[in-house]
């Protein structure tokens, strides 16, 4: 769980809010955040379940090295949440196990 | 600087492609463009700065005291790059680098932006892929709530957010103090700093002390250490760590010699120093050597930071850890080298212009050995003794499995281990298990990491979708190779 520091709080100058959903739940994030940062700031504890043992994982390195922030964004799996900037209306979902091929055809 | 918004805006080829927009890459690109080269700087992040100057142009953190004056120095480096003639592709993943068969002596690079791939050409390449945190596997380090210390720093710089509850920082290294002071300044509730610096390191480190005493970092470092130690609860000589909780972190357990302790917390930040990020240089075929003092694999480079592959140079922390300021200078030196190889600068002129930069670099690196020797991680953190500790986070391979394969099955190196256990075969491509696997094999077989070797990596250096590859235009030779 993360929280904004005083000067980055909602309503502070220059912090446009973007709407997005995580597993269908409507949330808002700051324009300029990455997907992983927006999830952390919203108190999301885990964003994926591993392919081997289905255990929950959360962003670990936030710099593109660990791949523990993999999520499904707008139907496309295996997206590195820490490298993708949050966009208005994004549909973000927990990635369960491996990326599923069926998602691609949708 | 010319921003490149989409993959189709890239030129067919450039004199120089620089990979990574940290201090080394930004300085290399700006200098090379100033010397008349056509330059592309490609970086996978949304904004320039790399990790140490992360989000320097976009950060919501306005109170300069939180991140400290050293951070804001990055603004000058970015501004200089922005004044240059170089092209800049943000959110651009470079996933392959190899010789261009149609044009001997030059390179072909695979890049992706927004899910679309392209192949482009380059006559020279500078890899400025920087450093990553050294893996620090402890029981429970895969639990949500456990992160690297650098991750918390990136969250603060990039998004202006800090861990919300009780936070414990554990590990060792100069960056640990910096992070603790930045988070404390941002009013994060740090309940303890568990310092794992081994006492046994002191005798060796003291031998390197005279140089360090004349280093520009000494005064800065001492001030930082004193301030953080005064403000925060420090537990020294920590010899063992574990993260505990069901589904999420609840508690960190530690040992201090014979004494055992536990601290309830919501976030645990781990840090055991930084090591060069070698996946790209390794996959490009550059020779590497194991640096005993930095205890990490480092690409072999010459005085101009040229690697063993002609035409590829490696600048910044990716060529050995020296810190942000030295990275910027090494970017300049690599750019002089590339310009000279392209005939844009005579060797005499190259030497003359680079001389003051080289002198500044020497001053900066003076005393670095002391830090390397003092903060060398304890053996139990390099190779976790508990069998159940996961070492490959992607494929969930444990330390016990690696030791068993090395001892009972006689697996001699990391590449063979990959085939037996799948460690290093997940999406992170060995970035987090590589150093630990090498350490575990070396320990089990009674040899050294240098003897054990490292993963042999191949492009794509970052995962790329089959759809992206399939959509690439095919050369006639490539089509003939598969069509009957």
Image: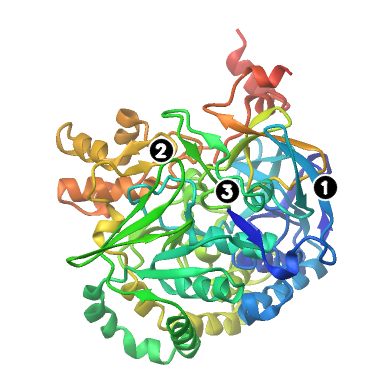
Q: Are marks 3 and 2 on the same chain?
A: no
Instruction: State the residue position of label 2.
Output: B424
- Colouring scheme, one of rainbow, by chain, secondary structure, one colour: rainbow
Q: Position of residue B253 (x, y in %)?
A: 32, 57
Residue found 62% across the figure and 49% down from its top: A43
For this view, does B451 lie left or right of residue B37?
Answer: left
Residue B35 seen anywhere in this rendered image of the structure: no
Instruction: Find disc 1 in the rendering and name its residue.
Output: B5
Q: CA distance from mark 3 to mark 2?
A: 16 Å
Assign the C terminus of chain B to one quadrant of the image: top right
Q: Residues within 10 Å of mark 3 (few under 14, many from 20)?
A: some
At mark 1, the secondary structure is loop
Q: Label 3, secondary structure: give it.
A: loop
Q: Establish if B207 lies above or below B122.
A: below
Q: Residue B47's quadrant in the figure? A: bottom right
Q: Residue at x 48, y 71 (%)?
A: B175
- Residue B75: horizontal and vertical position, in percent? 72, 73
The N terminus of chain B sits in image quarter: bottom right
State how many labels appear. 3
Label 1 marks a residue whose chain is: B
Label 3 vs label 1: CA separation?
21 Å
SS category of the residue bearing label 2: loop
Q: Quadrant of residue B419?
A: top left
The location of residue B271, given as percent across then percent down, is 43, 62
Residue A104, given in percent of the width and then of the height, sits at 69, 21
Q: Is residue A1 visible?
A: yes
Cβ atoms at labels 3 and 1 below 8 Å apart: no
Query: With B96 as the anchor, is A51 left or right in this view?
Result: left
The circle on residue B204 is none
Q: Quadrant of residue B32?
A: bottom right
Residue at label 3? A64
**In the depicted structure, whether residue B340 falls above or below residue B421:** below
């Amino acid at each position: 769980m993360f929280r904004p520091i005083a000067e980055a709080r909602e309503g502070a100058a220059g912090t446009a809010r973007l709407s997005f959903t995580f597993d269908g739940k409507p949330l808002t994030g700051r324009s300029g955040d990455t997907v992983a940062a927006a999830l952390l700031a919203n108190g999301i504890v885990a964003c994926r379940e591993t392919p081997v043992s289905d255990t929950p994982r959360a962003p670990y390195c936030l710099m593109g090295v660990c791949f523990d922030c993999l999520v499904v964004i707008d139907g496309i799996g295996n997206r590195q949440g820490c490298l993708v900037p949050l966009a208005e209306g994004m549909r973000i979902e927990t990635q369960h196990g491996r990326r599923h091929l069926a998602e691609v055809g949708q | 600087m010319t921003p490149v918004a989409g993959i189709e805006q890239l030129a067919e080829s450039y004199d120089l492609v620089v990979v990574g927009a940290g201090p080394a890459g930004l300085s290399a690109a700006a200098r090379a463009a100033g010397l008349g080269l056509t330059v592309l700087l490609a970086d996978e992040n949304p904004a320039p700065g790399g990790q140490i100057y992360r989000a320097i142009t976009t950060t919501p953190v306005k109170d300069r005291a939180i991140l400290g004056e050293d951070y804001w120095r990055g603004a000058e480096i970015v501004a200089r790059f922005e004044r240059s003639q170089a092209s800049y592709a943000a959110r651009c993943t470079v996933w392959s680098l190899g010789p261009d068969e149609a044009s001997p002596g030059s390179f072909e690079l695979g890049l992706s932006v927004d899910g679309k791939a392209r192949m482009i050409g380059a006559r020279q390449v500078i890899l400025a892929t920087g450093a990553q945190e050294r893996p620090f596997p402890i029981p429970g380090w895969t639990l949500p709530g456990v992160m690297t210390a650098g991750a918390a720093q990136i969250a603060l710089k990039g998004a202006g957010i800090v861990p919300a509850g009780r936070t414990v920082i554990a590990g060792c290294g100069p960056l640990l103090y910096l992070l603790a002071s930045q988070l404390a300044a941002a009013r994060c509730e740090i309940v303890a700093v568990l310092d794992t610096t081994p006492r046994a390191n002191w005798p060796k480190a003291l031998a390197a002390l005279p140089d360090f005493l004349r280093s520009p970092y000494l005064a800065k470092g001492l001030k930082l250490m004193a301030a953080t130690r005064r403000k925060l609860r420090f537990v020294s000589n920590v010899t063992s760590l574990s993260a505990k909780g069901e589904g999420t972190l609840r508690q960190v357990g530690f040992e201090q010699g014979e004494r055992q302790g536990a601290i309830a917390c919501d976030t645990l930040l781990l840090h055991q120093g930084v090591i060069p990020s070698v996946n790209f240089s390794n996959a490009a075929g550059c020779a590497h050597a194991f640096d005993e003092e930095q205890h990490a694999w480092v690409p072999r480079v010459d005085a101009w930071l040229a690697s063993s592959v002609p035409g590829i140079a490696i600048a910044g922390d990716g060529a050995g850890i020296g810190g942000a300021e030295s990275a910027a200078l090494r970017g300049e030196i690599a750019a002089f080298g590339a310009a000279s190889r392209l005939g844009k600068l005579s060797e005499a002129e190259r030497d003359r212009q680079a001389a003051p930069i080289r002198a500044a670099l020497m001053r900066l690196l003076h005393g670095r050995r002391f830090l390397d020797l003092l903060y060398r991680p304890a053996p139990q953190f390099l190779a976790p003794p508990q069998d159940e500790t996961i070492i490959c986070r992607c494929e969930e391979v444990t330390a016990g499995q690696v030791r068993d394969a090395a001892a009972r099955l006689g697996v001699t190196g990391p590449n063979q281990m990959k085939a037996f256990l799948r460690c290093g075969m997940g999406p992170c491509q060995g970035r987090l298990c590589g150093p630990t696997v090498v350490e575990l094999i070396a320990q089990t077989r009674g040899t050294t990491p240098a003897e054990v070797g490292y993963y042999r990596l191949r492009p794509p250096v970052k995962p790329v979708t089959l759809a992206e590859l399939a959509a690439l235009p095919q050369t006639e030779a490539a089509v003939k190779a598969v069509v009957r």
